[in-house]
Protein backbone atom coordinates (compact mmCIF):
# COMPACT_ATOMS: atom_id res chain seq x y z
CA UNK A 1 0.00 0.00 0.00
CA UNK A 2 1.28 3.47 -0.73
CA UNK A 3 0.52 6.93 -1.96
CA UNK A 4 2.04 8.56 -4.97
CA UNK A 5 2.08 12.16 -6.16
CA UNK A 6 2.21 12.54 -9.91
CA UNK A 7 1.69 14.86 -12.82
CA UNK A 8 2.04 14.39 -16.56
CA UNK A 9 2.15 16.37 -19.81
CA UNK A 10 1.82 15.63 -23.49
CA UNK A 11 5.10 16.38 -25.28
CA UNK A 12 5.99 16.99 -28.91
CA UNK A 13 9.57 15.86 -28.84
CA UNK A 14 11.74 13.21 -27.21
CA UNK A 15 12.92 14.58 -23.84
CA UNK A 16 15.81 12.12 -23.41
CA UNK A 17 18.49 14.69 -24.12
CA UNK A 18 17.02 17.26 -21.75
CA UNK A 19 16.75 14.63 -19.03
CA UNK A 20 20.38 13.66 -19.48
CA UNK A 21 21.47 17.32 -19.43
CA UNK A 22 19.57 17.70 -16.16
CA UNK A 23 21.69 14.88 -14.71
CA UNK A 24 18.95 12.26 -15.02
CA UNK A 25 19.87 8.61 -14.65
CA UNK A 26 18.44 6.09 -17.09
CA UNK A 27 16.65 3.27 -15.27
CA UNK A 28 14.90 0.87 -17.64
CA UNK A 29 12.69 0.49 -20.67
CA UNK A 30 9.51 -1.58 -20.48
CA UNK A 31 6.42 -2.42 -22.47
CA UNK A 32 3.28 -2.23 -20.33
CA UNK A 33 -0.14 -3.58 -21.14
CA UNK A 34 -2.85 -2.44 -18.74
CA UNK A 35 -6.34 -3.86 -18.53
CA UNK A 36 -8.84 -1.70 -16.64
CA UNK A 37 -11.92 -3.33 -15.18
CA UNK A 38 -15.49 -2.21 -14.64
CA UNK A 39 -16.91 -2.84 -11.17
CA UNK A 40 -20.15 -4.88 -10.96
CA UNK A 41 -21.98 -2.18 -8.98
CA UNK A 42 -19.78 0.88 -8.65
CA UNK A 43 -18.95 3.50 -11.18
CA UNK A 44 -15.17 3.67 -10.89
CA UNK A 45 -15.04 6.82 -13.06
CA UNK A 46 -17.56 8.59 -10.86
CA UNK A 47 -15.77 7.55 -7.68
CA UNK A 48 -12.42 8.36 -9.27
CA UNK A 49 -11.12 4.87 -8.60
CA UNK A 50 -9.66 2.19 -10.84
CA UNK A 51 -8.79 -1.50 -10.91
CA UNK A 52 -5.92 -2.34 -13.21
CA UNK A 53 -4.14 -5.52 -14.24
CA UNK A 54 -0.67 -4.70 -15.61
CA UNK A 55 1.59 -6.94 -17.63
CA UNK A 56 5.28 -6.04 -17.82
CA UNK A 57 7.06 -8.81 -19.66
CA UNK A 58 6.42 -11.90 -17.52
CA UNK A 59 5.33 -9.92 -14.48
CA UNK A 60 1.72 -9.22 -13.61
CA UNK A 61 0.33 -6.93 -10.94
CA UNK A 62 -3.19 -6.04 -9.84
CA UNK A 63 -3.65 -2.49 -8.57
CA UNK A 64 -6.46 -0.62 -6.92
CA UNK A 65 -6.18 3.14 -7.36
CA UNK A 66 -8.04 5.36 -4.91
CA UNK A 67 -9.59 8.75 -5.45
CA UNK A 68 -7.24 11.60 -6.35
CA UNK A 69 -6.79 14.36 -3.81
CA UNK A 70 -5.02 17.70 -4.10
CA UNK A 71 -4.70 20.03 -7.06
CA UNK A 72 -1.82 20.76 -9.42
CA UNK A 73 -0.42 17.28 -8.91
CA UNK A 74 -2.41 14.23 -8.03
CA UNK A 75 -1.96 12.21 -4.88
CA UNK A 76 -3.74 8.90 -4.75
CA UNK A 77 -3.65 5.72 -2.76
CA UNK A 78 -2.46 2.60 -4.53
CA UNK A 79 -2.76 -0.98 -3.38
CA UNK A 80 -0.73 -3.27 -5.61
CA UNK A 81 -0.22 -7.02 -5.44
CA UNK A 82 1.89 -9.32 -7.58
CA UNK A 83 0.00 -12.13 -9.32
CA UNK A 84 1.11 -15.75 -9.52
CA UNK A 85 -1.69 -16.72 -11.86
CA UNK A 86 -2.90 -13.79 -14.01
CA UNK A 87 -5.27 -15.87 -16.19
CA UNK A 88 -6.88 -17.45 -13.14
CA UNK A 89 -7.18 -14.03 -11.50
CA UNK A 90 -8.96 -12.61 -14.56
CA UNK A 91 -11.39 -15.59 -14.57
CA UNK A 92 -12.02 -15.08 -10.88
CA UNK A 93 -12.63 -11.34 -11.29
CA UNK A 94 -15.01 -12.02 -14.16
CA UNK A 95 -16.99 -14.54 -12.10
CA UNK A 96 -17.29 -11.86 -9.41
CA UNK A 97 -18.87 -9.55 -11.98
CA UNK A 98 -15.90 -7.41 -12.99
CA UNK A 99 -15.57 -6.77 -16.72
CA UNK A 100 -12.63 -5.79 -18.88
CA UNK A 101 -13.36 -2.21 -19.94
CA UNK A 102 -10.22 -0.73 -21.53
CA UNK A 103 -6.74 -1.79 -22.56
CA UNK A 104 -3.85 0.67 -22.62
CA UNK A 105 -0.52 -0.26 -24.17
CA UNK A 106 2.58 1.82 -23.86
CA UNK A 107 6.35 1.78 -24.16
CA UNK A 108 7.84 3.42 -21.07
CA UNK A 109 11.39 4.65 -20.56
CA UNK A 110 12.17 5.48 -16.95
CA UNK A 111 14.71 7.94 -15.57
CA UNK A 112 15.56 9.26 -12.12
CA UNK A 113 15.87 13.06 -11.95
CA UNK A 114 16.46 14.70 -8.54
CA UNK A 115 14.71 11.84 -6.78
CA UNK A 116 11.75 12.03 -9.15
CA UNK A 117 10.76 9.09 -11.35
CA UNK A 118 10.43 10.53 -14.86
CA UNK A 119 8.80 8.29 -17.48
CA UNK A 120 8.75 8.94 -21.20
CA UNK A 121 5.65 7.15 -22.45
CA UNK A 122 4.60 6.30 -25.99
CA UNK A 123 0.94 5.45 -25.47
CA UNK A 124 -0.84 3.55 -28.25
CA UNK A 125 -3.59 5.72 -29.72
CA UNK A 126 -2.82 8.70 -27.46
CA UNK A 127 0.69 9.96 -28.19
CA UNK A 128 3.85 10.90 -26.33
CA UNK A 129 3.84 11.91 -22.69
CA UNK A 130 6.16 12.60 -19.83
CA UNK A 131 5.02 11.50 -16.40
CA UNK A 132 6.69 12.59 -13.16
CA UNK A 133 6.06 10.67 -9.99
CA UNK A 134 7.22 10.42 -6.37
CA UNK A 135 6.14 7.96 -3.72
CA UNK A 136 5.06 9.40 -0.38
CA UNK A 137 6.46 8.06 2.88
CA UNK A 138 3.57 9.26 5.05
CA UNK A 139 0.17 10.62 4.17
CA UNK A 140 0.26 14.27 5.30
CA UNK A 141 -0.88 17.00 2.96
CA UNK A 142 2.26 18.90 3.94
CA UNK A 143 4.46 16.15 2.51
CA UNK A 144 2.24 16.00 -0.60
CA UNK A 145 2.71 19.76 -1.13
CA UNK A 146 6.49 19.47 -0.69
CA UNK A 147 6.66 16.60 -3.18
CA UNK A 148 4.40 18.44 -5.61
CA UNK A 149 6.84 21.39 -5.52
CA UNK A 150 9.65 18.99 -6.31
CA UNK A 151 7.72 17.63 -9.30
CA UNK A 152 7.12 21.17 -10.57
CA UNK A 153 10.82 22.02 -10.16
CA UNK A 154 11.87 18.98 -12.20
CA UNK A 155 9.17 19.76 -14.75
CA UNK A 156 10.66 23.26 -15.13
CA UNK A 157 14.19 21.83 -15.45
CA UNK A 158 12.95 19.74 -18.35
CA UNK A 159 11.41 22.81 -20.02
CA UNK A 160 7.83 21.57 -19.82
CA UNK A 161 5.17 24.23 -20.33
CA UNK A 162 3.39 24.61 -16.98
CA UNK A 163 0.02 24.99 -18.72
CA UNK A 164 0.39 21.57 -20.24
CA UNK A 165 0.63 19.78 -16.91
CA UNK A 166 -2.35 17.57 -16.16
CA UNK A 167 -3.47 15.10 -13.53
CA UNK A 168 -5.66 13.24 -16.01
CA UNK A 169 -4.96 9.54 -16.34
CA UNK A 170 -4.31 7.75 -19.66
CA UNK A 171 -7.52 5.86 -19.00
CA UNK A 172 -9.53 9.09 -18.81
CA UNK A 173 -7.85 10.43 -21.94
CA UNK A 174 -8.67 7.23 -23.80
CA UNK A 175 -12.27 7.23 -22.57
CA UNK A 176 -12.86 10.88 -23.54
CA UNK A 177 -11.13 10.32 -26.87
CA UNK A 178 -13.24 7.27 -27.70
CA UNK A 179 -16.46 9.00 -26.61
CA UNK A 180 -15.67 12.15 -28.65
CA UNK A 181 -14.85 10.04 -31.72
CA UNK A 182 -18.18 8.28 -31.18
CA UNK A 183 -19.91 11.67 -31.15
CA UNK A 184 -18.26 12.60 -34.41
CA UNK A 185 -19.65 9.60 -36.25
CA UNK B 1 -10.31 -23.80 -12.94
CA UNK B 2 -11.99 -27.09 -12.14
CA UNK B 3 -15.06 -28.85 -10.96
CA UNK B 4 -15.31 -31.02 -7.90
CA UNK B 5 -17.92 -33.46 -6.73
CA UNK B 6 -18.21 -33.77 -2.99
CA UNK B 7 -20.31 -34.91 -0.08
CA UNK B 8 -19.81 -34.80 3.67
CA UNK B 9 -21.25 -36.16 6.90
CA UNK B 10 -20.99 -35.35 10.58
CA UNK B 11 -19.36 -38.26 12.46
CA UNK B 12 -19.24 -39.26 16.12
CA UNK B 13 -15.99 -41.15 16.13
CA UNK B 14 -12.56 -40.96 14.55
CA UNK B 15 -12.71 -42.82 11.22
CA UNK B 16 -8.93 -43.28 10.87
CA UNK B 17 -9.04 -46.97 11.66
CA UNK B 18 -11.90 -47.70 9.22
CA UNK B 19 -10.08 -45.76 6.51
CA UNK B 20 -6.92 -47.78 7.07
CA UNK B 21 -8.87 -51.03 7.06
CA UNK B 22 -10.38 -49.96 3.71
CA UNK B 23 -6.85 -49.64 2.30
CA UNK B 24 -6.77 -45.86 2.53
CA UNK B 25 -3.45 -44.06 2.21
CA UNK B 26 -2.64 -41.25 4.62
CA UNK B 27 -1.73 -38.06 2.74
CA UNK B 28 -1.20 -35.11 5.05
CA UNK B 29 -2.44 -33.17 8.04
CA UNK B 30 -3.05 -29.43 7.76
CA UNK B 31 -4.55 -26.55 9.66
CA UNK B 32 -6.79 -24.41 7.45
CA UNK B 33 -8.12 -20.96 8.18
CA UNK B 34 -10.76 -19.79 5.71
CA UNK B 35 -12.07 -16.26 5.42
CA UNK B 36 -15.33 -15.91 3.49
CA UNK B 37 -16.18 -12.55 1.96
CA UNK B 38 -19.41 -10.69 1.34
CA UNK B 39 -19.82 -9.27 -2.18
CA UNK B 40 -20.50 -5.51 -2.44
CA UNK B 41 -23.68 -5.98 -4.49
CA UNK B 42 -24.46 -9.68 -4.79
CA UNK B 43 -25.87 -12.02 -2.25
CA UNK B 44 -23.44 -14.93 -2.45
CA UNK B 45 -25.71 -17.10 -0.28
CA UNK B 46 -28.70 -16.48 -2.54
CA UNK B 47 -26.66 -17.14 -5.67
CA UNK B 48 -25.01 -20.15 -4.00
CA UNK B 49 -21.54 -18.75 -4.65
CA UNK B 50 -18.63 -17.99 -2.35
CA UNK B 51 -15.32 -16.15 -2.26
CA UNK B 52 -12.80 -17.66 0.12
CA UNK B 53 -9.28 -16.81 1.19
CA UNK B 54 -7.59 -19.88 2.64
CA UNK B 55 -4.44 -20.01 4.72
CA UNK B 56 -2.62 -23.34 4.99
CA UNK B 57 0.63 -22.75 6.88
CA UNK B 58 2.50 -20.24 4.75
CA UNK B 59 0.35 -20.81 1.67
CA UNK B 60 -2.58 -18.63 0.73
CA UNK B 61 -5.17 -19.18 -1.98
CA UNK B 62 -8.17 -17.20 -3.17
CA UNK B 63 -11.08 -19.28 -4.46
CA UNK B 64 -14.34 -18.51 -6.20
CA UNK B 65 -16.92 -21.23 -5.76
CA UNK B 66 -19.76 -21.41 -8.24
CA UNK B 67 -23.31 -22.55 -7.75
CA UNK B 68 -23.84 -26.16 -6.78
CA UNK B 69 -25.52 -28.43 -9.30
CA UNK B 70 -26.79 -31.98 -8.96
CA UNK B 71 -28.33 -33.76 -6.01
CA UNK B 72 -26.98 -36.36 -3.58
CA UNK B 73 -23.45 -35.03 -4.03
CA UNK B 74 -22.57 -31.50 -4.97
CA UNK B 75 -20.68 -30.51 -8.10
CA UNK B 76 -19.44 -26.96 -8.30
CA UNK B 77 -17.02 -24.90 -10.31
CA UNK B 78 -13.94 -23.65 -8.51
CA UNK B 79 -11.48 -21.03 -9.66
CA UNK B 80 -8.47 -20.95 -7.40
CA UNK B 81 -5.36 -18.79 -7.53
CA UNK B 82 -2.27 -18.76 -5.30
CA UNK B 83 -1.52 -15.46 -3.58
CA UNK B 84 1.89 -13.81 -3.34
CA UNK B 85 0.66 -11.06 -1.06
CA UNK B 86 -2.36 -12.13 1.04
CA UNK B 87 -2.47 -8.96 3.20
CA UNK B 88 -2.33 -6.74 0.12
CA UNK B 89 -5.03 -8.86 -1.54
CA UNK B 90 -7.34 -8.48 1.47
CA UNK B 91 -6.78 -4.67 1.45
CA UNK B 92 -7.50 -4.58 -2.25
CA UNK B 93 -10.68 -6.66 -1.91
CA UNK B 94 -11.86 -4.43 0.94
CA UNK B 95 -11.28 -1.29 -1.14
CA UNK B 96 -13.40 -2.90 -3.86
CA UNK B 97 -16.24 -3.27 -1.36
CA UNK B 98 -15.82 -6.91 -0.30
CA UNK B 99 -16.14 -7.53 3.43
CA UNK B 100 -14.92 -10.33 5.64
CA UNK B 101 -18.05 -12.19 6.65
CA UNK B 102 -17.05 -15.46 8.33
CA UNK B 103 -13.94 -17.30 9.43
CA UNK B 104 -13.79 -21.08 9.56
CA UNK B 105 -10.87 -22.88 11.19
CA UNK B 106 -10.31 -26.57 10.96
CA UNK B 107 -7.76 -29.32 11.37
CA UNK B 108 -7.89 -31.58 8.32
CA UNK B 109 -6.38 -35.03 7.90
CA UNK B 110 -6.42 -36.24 4.30
CA UNK B 111 -6.47 -39.79 2.98
CA UNK B 112 -6.82 -41.39 -0.42
CA UNK B 113 -9.40 -44.18 -0.61
CA UNK B 114 -10.18 -45.78 -4.00
CA UNK B 115 -9.20 -42.58 -5.80
CA UNK B 116 -11.38 -40.46 -3.52
CA UNK B 117 -9.91 -37.73 -1.33
CA UNK B 118 -11.26 -38.39 2.17
CA UNK B 119 -10.76 -35.64 4.75
CA UNK B 120 -11.35 -35.98 8.46
CA UNK B 121 -12.14 -32.47 9.64
CA UNK B 122 -12.27 -31.03 13.15
CA UNK B 123 -14.11 -27.79 12.54
CA UNK B 124 -13.98 -25.15 15.28
CA UNK B 125 -17.45 -24.56 16.66
CA UNK B 126 -19.08 -27.18 14.42
CA UNK B 127 -17.65 -30.59 15.24
CA UNK B 128 -16.19 -33.62 13.49
CA UNK B 129 -16.86 -34.35 9.84
CA UNK B 130 -15.76 -36.58 7.03
CA UNK B 131 -15.65 -35.04 3.57
CA UNK B 132 -15.29 -37.05 0.36
CA UNK B 133 -14.24 -35.35 -2.82
CA UNK B 134 -13.20 -36.07 -6.40
CA UNK B 135 -12.06 -33.65 -9.07
CA UNK B 136 -13.81 -33.89 -12.44
CA UNK B 137 -11.84 -34.06 -15.66
CA UNK B 138 -14.61 -32.74 -17.88
CA UNK B 139 -17.92 -31.16 -17.09
CA UNK B 140 -20.51 -33.71 -18.19
CA UNK B 141 -23.35 -34.71 -15.90
CA UNK B 142 -22.61 -38.31 -16.82
CA UNK B 143 -19.12 -38.03 -15.33
CA UNK B 144 -20.56 -36.27 -12.29
CA UNK B 145 -23.01 -39.15 -11.76
CA UNK B 146 -20.26 -41.73 -12.10
CA UNK B 147 -18.08 -39.88 -9.61
CA UNK B 148 -21.00 -39.44 -7.24
CA UNK B 149 -21.52 -43.22 -7.28
CA UNK B 150 -17.88 -43.67 -6.42
CA UNK B 151 -18.24 -41.29 -3.47
CA UNK B 152 -21.28 -43.20 -2.22
CA UNK B 153 -19.39 -46.51 -2.55
CA UNK B 154 -16.49 -45.20 -0.46
CA UNK B 155 -18.92 -43.71 2.01
CA UNK B 156 -20.49 -47.15 2.43
CA UNK B 157 -17.06 -48.80 2.83
CA UNK B 158 -16.42 -46.41 5.73
CA UNK B 159 -19.73 -47.31 7.34
CA UNK B 160 -21.23 -43.85 7.04
CA UNK B 161 -24.99 -43.68 7.51
CA UNK B 162 -26.43 -42.66 4.12
CA UNK B 163 -29.01 -40.42 5.78
CA UNK B 164 -26.26 -38.36 7.33
CA UNK B 165 -24.73 -37.37 3.97
CA UNK B 166 -25.10 -33.72 3.14
CA UNK B 167 -23.98 -31.26 0.50
CA UNK B 168 -24.15 -28.35 2.91
CA UNK B 169 -20.96 -26.35 3.27
CA UNK B 170 -19.26 -25.57 6.59
CA UNK B 171 -20.01 -21.93 5.86
CA UNK B 172 -23.75 -22.65 5.63
CA UNK B 173 -23.66 -24.75 8.80
CA UNK B 174 -21.89 -21.95 10.63
CA UNK B 175 -24.29 -19.32 9.31
CA UNK B 176 -27.40 -21.32 10.28
CA UNK B 177 -25.89 -22.18 13.66
CA UNK B 178 -25.02 -18.56 14.43
CA UNK B 179 -28.48 -17.34 13.32
CA UNK B 180 -30.28 -20.01 15.38
CA UNK B 181 -28.17 -19.16 18.45
CA UNK B 182 -29.11 -15.51 17.92
CA UNK B 183 -32.77 -16.53 17.89
CA UNK B 184 -32.34 -18.32 21.20
CA UNK B 185 -31.08 -15.21 23.01
Image (cartoon, coloured by chain):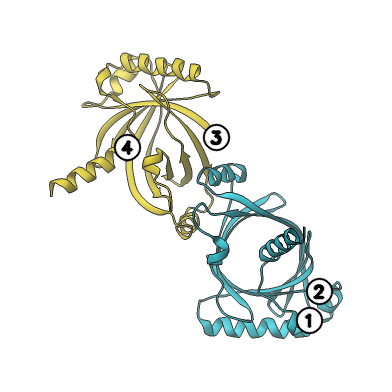
Chain colours: A cyan, B yellow
As measured in the structure, the alpha-carbon distance from the residue carrying label 4 to the one carrying label 3 is 22 Å
Q: Is residue A11 above or below residue B75?
A: below
User: In the drawing, does residue B16 fall left or right of residue A5?
Assistant: left
Residue on which disc 1 sits: A160
Instruction: Check if mark 1's residue and mark 2's residue have beta carbons within 8 Å.
Output: yes
Q: Is residue B54 above or below residue A164?
A: above
Residue A11 - label: 2
Residue B1 - label: 3
As measured in the structure, the alpha-carbon distance from the residue carrying label 1 to the one carrying label 2 is 8 Å
- Total numbered badges shown on the rendered structure: 4
User: In the drawing, does residue B38 fall left or right of residue A75?
Assistant: left
The answer to whether residue B160 shows anywhere in this view is no
Residue B170 - label: 4
Residue displayed at 66% across by 67% down: A169
Q: Nearer the viewer, mark 2 or mark 4?
A: 2
Instruction: State the image coordinates of residue B168 (x, y, percent, origin top left).
Output: 32, 32
Instruction: State the image coordinates of residue A44 (x, y, percent, origin top left).
Output: 55, 61
Instruction: Check if mark 3's residue and mark 1's residue have beta carbons within 8 Å.
Output: no
Q: Quadrant of residue A13?
A: bottom right
Are dots 4 and 1 on a single chain? no
Amino acid sequence: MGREVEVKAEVEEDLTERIERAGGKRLREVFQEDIYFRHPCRDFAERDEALRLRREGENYTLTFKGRRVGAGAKMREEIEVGLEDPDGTVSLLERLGFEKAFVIKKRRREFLVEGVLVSLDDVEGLGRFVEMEVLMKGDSLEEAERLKDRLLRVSEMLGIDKDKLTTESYLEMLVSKSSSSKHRT
